[in-house]
Image (cartoon, rainbow, N blue to C red):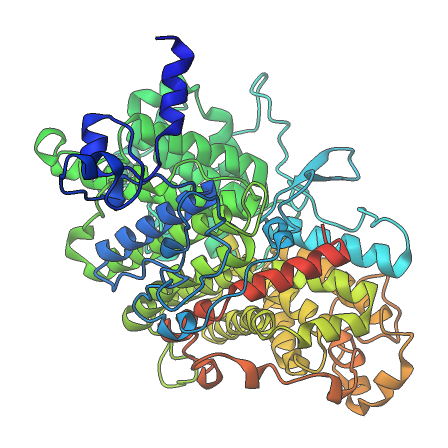
Amino acid sequence: MEPGTGRNKVTKRSSNACVRCRRQKIKCSGSQPCDACGKRKQSCTFDERDQRIVVTRGYIIDLQQRIERWERSKSTNEPARDSIEGGQAADKVESGSESDVSMAGAEGPDSTQPSRGTEKQDARPKPPMDPVASTLINPLSTGQSEFMTAPTGRIFYLGTSSNWSFTRRVLNITHQYVNKTPLPTSALIFDAAAYTLDWDGYRIGDGPEMPALPTQDYAIYLVNAVKFHCSQMFHLFDEESFMKSLYHFYSDPNPRADPTDLWFIHFLLILAFGKAFTTKANRSRKPPGHDYFIKAVQLLPDLSVLLKQAALSTEILCSLALYMQCVDFRHASHNFIGQAIRMALGEGMHTDMPTQVLGEAYVERCRRIWYTAHILDREMTSLFGLPPSIHDDYVQCQLPTYSGSSQRTAALRMRIKLSEVIGSINRKVYGRDGRLNNKFMLGTKNVLESMAHVANDLQQSFALPLERDTSCISRTSAHLHLLHHQCIVLATRPLLFCFLKIRFESESKCTELLGSSQTVRNLIQMCMDSSQQMIAILDCLQSQGLLETFLPFDLEAIFVSTGSLLLGPAIDPQAFEGVVPSLEKAHTVFDEMIAAGNAVANFQKAELQQLEIMLQQLTQTHPQAAADDPGAANEAPCQQQQQQIADDTSPHDTVISSLATDLSQNESYTSSLPGNLEEMTFDSGLTMTQLLDMANSIEHEDTEWMSQTIVEHSIW
C-alpha cells in the first residue's frame, strides 16, 4: 500500500464513528446504524465523548480559568462560582466547525447550563460579540512601553499598574491638551529625588563615619517603636535572637561595633527605622535615621557572606527594601526585595518546611520571613508596574502561629489574600497586552468576583466602624481596608483614563457615551466610592493620631485616592460634585505628612495640585458653567500653593464645580447601581453581595460597547 493511500483512508473516515468501527479501526459511514454494523446486524452505538470538535484556544483558556476559580473557592470553603458567564461557553460549541465559544452567544433553550447565582443573567441569550471586541485593550498596558526623562537625563520606565506612572500619564495628556506642549519634568518627583542620603554608593575609601550609638535604654525604646509600627504586618527581626544579641552587645561598658557582624548591620537598620518613627518633625533633606541606614548599607557584605546566615540576611534585605521604599528609592527597593525573595526561595522558605527536621522555632521564623518578603515583593512590584517574582501556586508555606495569637494570624491571612488579588489584577487587568478576552473588562469582572469573598471576610473579622466616636479604630484593620480599596481602584481606574481622553476630544461625546453604558458608569462610581472611603479612613486615623507619616502605605493610599477623585469630576461633574469634602480632607492628610517632614508627600501634593490647575484651565472656555455654581468661588484656599499658581486662584475652585453641564444630559449614577450598591453605608464599604452584583452586571454587550468606544476614539 502506498503511504499516501493510508492517509487518504484516514481522512475519509467520518468524524462521528460508532464504538464498534472505532474499536476495529474500520471505516464508519456515520449513519445510525452505520453500514458496517447494519450489514452484520450488530448493535450500533455512538460515544459522544469520542467525537472530535474544533474549538478556539480562548475556549480552553476560559475552562482553565474556571477550574482555577472553582478550586480556589473550594479551598476557602466558599460556594463554587466556577463560571462568570453561567456556564454558557460549555455548550456553545457546534461539532465539526470552529466557533469562538468564549465570545459567541448561545442559540436555543438548551444551549446554556446556568451556574449557581447566575440564572438571571443566563435567562436571556447573549448577542454575538462584535469581532472588534476581541481587540479591546487596556490603554495603560498595550502598545509600545512608555518612558519619561528626568531633569538629570535619566530615563524612567512607566509601569502599567504603577500609581506613580499613572499620575505621569494623566499629567502628560492633560498638559498636552491644555497647553499644547509636552509636560515639563522640572516640577515632578522622580526616583531617589525626594531625599539626599549623603553617600555616593561606593564602598572604597573611608565611607561615612560610624554614627553615635544610643544608650541601651534608648536603643530598646527605638526597637519597641519599630515593633509597634511594623510587627503586626511585617517581620523585620526575630525578637528573641535580636534582643539576646542586643543585651550581649551592651553588656560591655564600652560597646564596640564589629563591622563584620551581620547582627550589628541589622541593628543599625532597626535603629534607622526607630529614629524615623520617633522623630516628630524633620526639616532636613535627609530622612530621619539616614546615618544609621547609610552605615548599614556601606557595611553590607557580598551575597556569598549573606548566604551563610540566610534567615538573618533575608530579614536584613527586607529591612533595606522597606526603608528604601519609605524614602522613595523605588528602584533600589525593588532590587533589595528581589534579593530577599530569591534568598528565601533558595532556602526553601516558600515550601512546607518540616519542623521535626529543622526545629519548630526555626521553621516559625522562616514562615514569618517568607510572608514578609512575599507580601512586600507583591506590593512593590505592583507599585512599580512590574510582574511579581513568584506565582501563588508555588507558595506552600504554612502560616506562622505567632505564639497562639489568632488575630495576628488572621490579619496575615487576610493580607496574603489581598496580595493575591493584587497579583490577579496585574495579570488580568494590566497584563502583557491587556486584551479583552482575558484582561480589562472581563478581567475586571474576574477580579471583582475574587474580591467579593475577601470583602466578606474583611467585614466579619476586621470591621472598621468609622462613624463611632466612642472607640478608636484598629490600625491593622485600617491597613487592610485601605489595601482592599486600593485594589478596587487599581482594577477600575483604566476607565478613568479612557474617558478623560474622550473628554479631551469632545465633552458632549463623553457625556453621551457615559449615558449609554450603565456598567461603565457603575465601575467608575465604584472607583470613586473606594477613593472616598480611603480618605475617610485616613481622616479617622489622623484624628486619632494613628496616621503613618514615614511608612509608605498611608501616603500611597492618599495619593491614589486623591488622583482618582480629581479625574471623576473632570469626566462627569454632576455625578461627582460631592467629592469636595473628601478632597479637603485629603489636603489635610497631606499637610500632616508634610509637617512631619515627609518630603515625598510634599512632591506628590504639588503634582496633584498641578493637575487640579490644568483641569481648571480646561473649563475656562465655559464661563456659564462657573456662573451656575455661585458657591464655587467661596471654596477655602489650599495651603502651600505651587509657585505657578496665581495669587488670586483657589485650588479648590477647580473641576469639581467649574465643569458643570446641563443636568438633563446626565443620569444619576446612584440610581443605576446594581443590586444593593445603592444601600452602601460609608462606614462599611462594599459587601460581598454588592461586589458580586457588580461583577455579574458586566455582560458581553458591555465589553462590545467598550471595544467600539476605544477603537472609535483611538484610546491607545
Q: Single out the residue that lies furthest toward the front.
A: 39
Q: Is residue 421 above or below residue 50?
A: below
- Residue 53's x, y, as percent? 38, 41
* Residue in front for this viewpoint, 676 or 249: 676
* Residue in front for this viewpoint, 105 or 247: 105
Q: Which residue is drawn at 27% across and 61% down?
A: 80
Q: Which residue is drawn at 78% across and 90% down?
A: 631
Image quadrant of residue 114? Answer: bottom left
Q: In this view, does 335 lie to the left or right of 304?
A: right
Asked if residue 605 shows in the view, the reply is no
Q: Residue at x 57, y 20 (%)?
A: 206
Q: Is residue 472 above or below residue 343?
A: below
Q: In this view, does 228 lie to the left or right of 181?
A: left
- Residue 516's x, y, as percent? 66, 75
* Residue in front for this viewpoint, 587 or 459: 459
Q: Single out the residue that lies furthest toward the left.
A: 356
Q: Is residue 533 above or below residue 271?
A: below
- Residue 518's x, y, as percent? 59, 75
Image quadrant of residue 149? Answer: top right
Q: Is residue 227 above or below residue 517?
A: above
- Residue 355's x, y, as percent? 12, 35
Q: How many marks?
A: 0
Q: In this view, does 359 lie to the left or right of 683?
A: left
Q: Residue at x 90, y 51 (%)?
A: 181
Asked if residue 625 shows in the view, the reply is yes
The quarter of the picture where the N terminus appears is: top left
Q: Single out the residue that lies furthest toward the top.
A: 2
* Residue in front for this viewpoint, 330 or 225: 330
